[in-house]
Amino acid sequence: MVRIASLAQGAVFELQARGLDLRPGPDPRAIVNAREALARCPAILENQPRISRISNIHSQPLGRHKLPEKKNLSTDGSAQAGGKTAAPTTPPLPIRLEEIRFSDIPFRRLGGLTLPIAQRLTLIAGRNGIGKSTVLALISNASGLSRKGKSRNSYFEKLPQANLHEIIQLSGDRDFVEDEAKKPSIFLKYRAGNDFFEKKCNVTKRSPAGFRIVPRNEPKGQKIVGPYKILADGKVPVPTIYLGMIRMLPIGEAEETLKNAKSTPHPEDAKFLDEFTRKIIHTGAHHDSPEITAQWVADTKKMSLHPPYGGYDSTGVSLGQDSLSAIATALVSFQKLKRELPNYPGGILVIDEIDAGFHPQAQVKLLQELKTQANRLSLQIIATTHSLTMLAEAHAEIHEVPDPKNRRDAIVYLQGGLPVELLDVSDYQAIHDDMYLNLRKPPEQPVVKVYVEDDEAALFLGAILTPARLRAIASRTQRRIKIISARVGCANLVGLLRADEYFKSVLIVLDADTTSVKTGGATNVLRLPIDPRVTVKQSPESIIESMCKALVSDLATYPETRKMLRKAGHSTDHIQNSILALQSNETEAEVEVSADRDFAKKWFTRRLESIGTLKIIEGWVADNAAGVEQFLSDFERAVVDVAGPSSAKKAKPAKVIKSS
């Protein structure tokens, strides 16, 4: 007995020499250092009741207490006790954070904002000093497990919870308001199944010099949600792990305070640590049963588990590898909690500056793997980032899902200035431009090209599609219109539809006299409106000639054109002299315009300036309102067809805007 006592006392001295605090509640990270000493003297377990037994990195005070009954896991994950399989349990009901809302009275710079939280991954972005870390601190502070127990500990050797005062400092002058009516409030809305509940947070005074934020039910009182008891004052019972920038503390600068020791986590967890790490940044090593190292910096919160590395150990890792080990430790902690908790409600993993230390390829890999693990472990991952690589990758994948209600990930971008606002992130370019403080120009709308036979048809179509009408069409279809004169016959123009798929993405507008040309039912082929008064060929040249003859001979025709002539100080005599009469060097007056295409074009070209000055085509459009209105309706429908239905706003019937 004397020898046993002597050995025990010697082991105690050795533990104390290594810096182990043997008072009740020793630092669990330091216990790992004592494994070999305890192994040399197992009698300490009986003679030193305050020393924790080191069965693995998760310490459980034993003293003289009876060892707990050994439990294993069955293949379906249910607990086994005494070699018998426990009855299967109902799948746990997950608790999800839906949003964080700031009252109109701002907390710091954040007021009148509601930040949606996605079911799987939420990236919070914005420029420096905008309030991103404050949001993370408030989210982390509102949830976590508070009841102690071995199965509730994370691999960081503490409960999976965080407290706001451990993340950001509260100021009495800046953050605390005595008057209840003037206090800024923060509301966090949660969901469990079909039930919703809310936590309200205010800064309260804990002591003359200390302040805290306690999440309280709103409305007040305890709530029962499914199998969970939501205390009136306290955290939502969801395992929550916060990873701050302490994980990036350079171990090379830790000097004498850097500690490490062999750790023996659950075999499944050791395997996960090794495999997850190698997927993101290859370690140069592979083991079927990897040896895990716990590494920490004394007197700080920096601690993580490391897999084996090829050619170096955990003291030689880079900043990126060190950060990755912390993320892996958090994930494997949730894996442990899911395995050991009888009603695992999912978890919340909060990461500040998730991209820190990672090169672009590793950032993309990390993002993808985090989504996989979030699905497997029923996690909500909420992280801040300044990485355009991560934001571009996430944005592209988010918008692959057309219906926002079905998207499991989100980007929340806090736009700077006073007040802080949420940026519309439907367009990635908006994120990029705000990151660089680029002045934003309104994005140009895509163009729908419209092909017509010749210049004369382009003039007619241009008169129909006035600037006001083009703006109205662009507003409703989100497309700009570009008219192109193909200078080919109508049959050749239609033939392009069969020759090249490209011409199915444009509009083709034929002259009104092309009814004999077959279009095969193509919805992107239209015809200019006819003139019901014209009895000859309905080509642009024939319409102008017939119209001018009617204007000088029949007072009852084309009233809108006559008004336009009078307003401009013109009369039908100007039409007779400048359009109908023979012009200089003309000798073919006996040939009708409608009878010869080449003559018609020459006739039109010689009179083009006069036709424009007298606004004959604009007058024709005004006097053919019914036909033009039908054409505009068909035209807009065709634009939507070639551009796709997503281009159209809730369609309103196209209205004719009279030319002035």
Image (cartoon, rainbow, N blue to C red):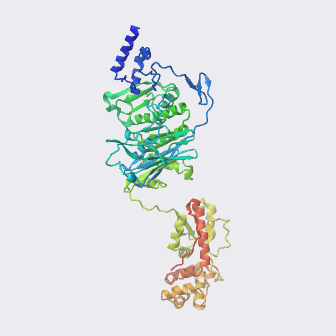
Viewer-nearest residue: 355 or 239 = 239
Q: Quarter of the image containing the N terminus?
A: top left
Relative to 94, is 12 above or below? above
Q: Is residue 337 visible?
A: yes
Q: Nearer the viewer, residue 146 or 549?
A: 146
Query: Where residue 361 sits: x, y (%)?
Result: 45, 41
Of residues 104 and 64, the one nearer the viewer is 64
Residue 481 percent coordinates (x, y): 53, 67
Would residue 20 appear left or right of 92 to someone viewing this image?
A: left
Q: Residue at x 45, y 22 (%)?
A: 54
Specify the quadrant of the image occupied by residue 63.
top left
Q: Position of residue 289 (x, y in %)?
A: 51, 24
Given the current orientation, which residue lies at the most extreme top position?
A: 2
422 lies above or below 640:
above
Q: Residue at x 63, y 29 (%)?
A: 87
Residue 620, x across and y down, in percent: 57, 81
Q: Is residue 67 left or right of residue 85?
A: left
Q: Is residue 435 visible?
A: no
For the residue pair 229 and 363, the one nearer the viewer reads as 229
Residue at x 35% of width, y 35% of height: 249
Q: How many marks?
A: 0
- 262 sits to left or right of 554: left
